[in-house]
Image (cartoon, rainbow, N blue to C red):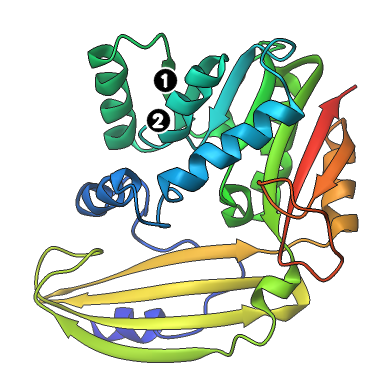
Amino acid sequence: MFTQLKKMLQKPALYEKGTIALWTDEHISKGMLEAHLNPAWDAATRNHATVRENVKFIASAAPPETYRDLLDLGCGPGIYAEEFHKAGYRVSGMDISQRSIDYARSAAKERDLPITYWCKDFTAMDFSECFDLITLIYYDFCTLPTESRAKALENINAALKKGGLLIVEVHTPRHIEGKEEYTRWEYAESGFLCGEPHVCLEAFHRYDEHNTVLDRTVIIMEGDVRSVNIWHHTFTREEFTRDLNAAGLRVKSVCGDMLGAEYCDDGKEMCFVAQRV
C-alpha cells in the first residue's frame, strides 16, 4: 500500500486517469444527481433560473422552427432537455451516467415528455446526419483530453445534418490565471467522493504549457487508496476555432457566455456557434 500511496502523491502526467471514474461511480453518482437536481446550486448543472436563460439564448441563436431536432450532450438528468422541449425542440439527450439517464427517462415518462435519452459516452457516438442542433453546455468539453476532444468534434460533425449547428461553451486561459498550486489534507467519516471513513489529499496542479489544470483528490481508506482526476483545458479563441475547423465545422459567431454576452478578449469564457458545412 505504501508504494501505491507514494505513486498517488506524485504529480500526474498530463491527462493521466484517476482510479475512480467520476461520472459512473456508484457512490459519487448519488451525490452528483442530487447536485444536478438542486434548483439553487451551480454544481453539476447550473442553477435552474440560469438554465432557463441559457435556453432562451440558444433558442434565439438556433430557432426551433429551423433547427428542430436537438441533441443535448452531457445532458445529466434532463434539466436542460426538458427546458428545450418547452421551447419547441424535438429533444434527445446523451450522458455517460446511468443513474442520471435512469432519472431522466423516469421523469420524462412520468411527465409524458417525448424526449429520447441514451446512456453513452459522446466521444463514442456514431450518428450520421440526424440532428439540426447539438448543444454541449457547462464546459464539459474542457474536461476531455486532446485526442478525445478531436474525436468528439468529429462525431458531432457527423451527427449534424448539413447546415446544422453546434453550440458549445469553453473557458479561456483567463479562467485559471493567478490560481496557485496547492495540496491540503482532511479526514471525513463520509463524503461526496467516498461513503466510508477516509483521509483526502486534495491537490491543484497547473500544466501551463498546455493551458490545462488538474483538480486531484487522493482518497485513503483502510487498506485501499483511490484517486479522482478532473482535468480542465482552457482555449484561446484561435485554438478552438482551429479545432472546430479541423473537424469540418465553421464558426458562425462567438459570444462572451451562454447568455449571449458580447465577446471580450479578456473574458474567462466563450460560447461558440459553429455550423456543419
Residue that carries the numbered disc 2 in the rendered image: 78
| Residue toward you, 90 or 12 | 90
| Residue toward you, 22 or 165 | 165
Q: Quadrant of the N terminus?
A: bottom left
Tell whether label 2 touches label 1 (CB within 8 Å). yes
The local crowd at label 1, few if under 14, some if 14 to 19, many if 20 or more residues have their Cα within 10 Å, is: many
| Above or below, comparing residue 125 to residue 47 in the picture | above
Horizontal and vertical percent position of residue 98: 31, 33
Circle 1 sits in a helix, a strand or a loop, which is it? strand
Q: Is residue 123 visible?
A: no
Q: Which mark is residue 81?
A: none
Left or right? Give the position of 5 relative to 47.
left
Residue that carries the numbered disc 1 in the rendered image: 117
Q: Residue at x 31, y 52 (%)?
A: 35
Task: Please name the amino acid that badge 1 sits on.
Answer: Tyr
Circle 2 sits in a helix, a strand or a loop, which is it? loop
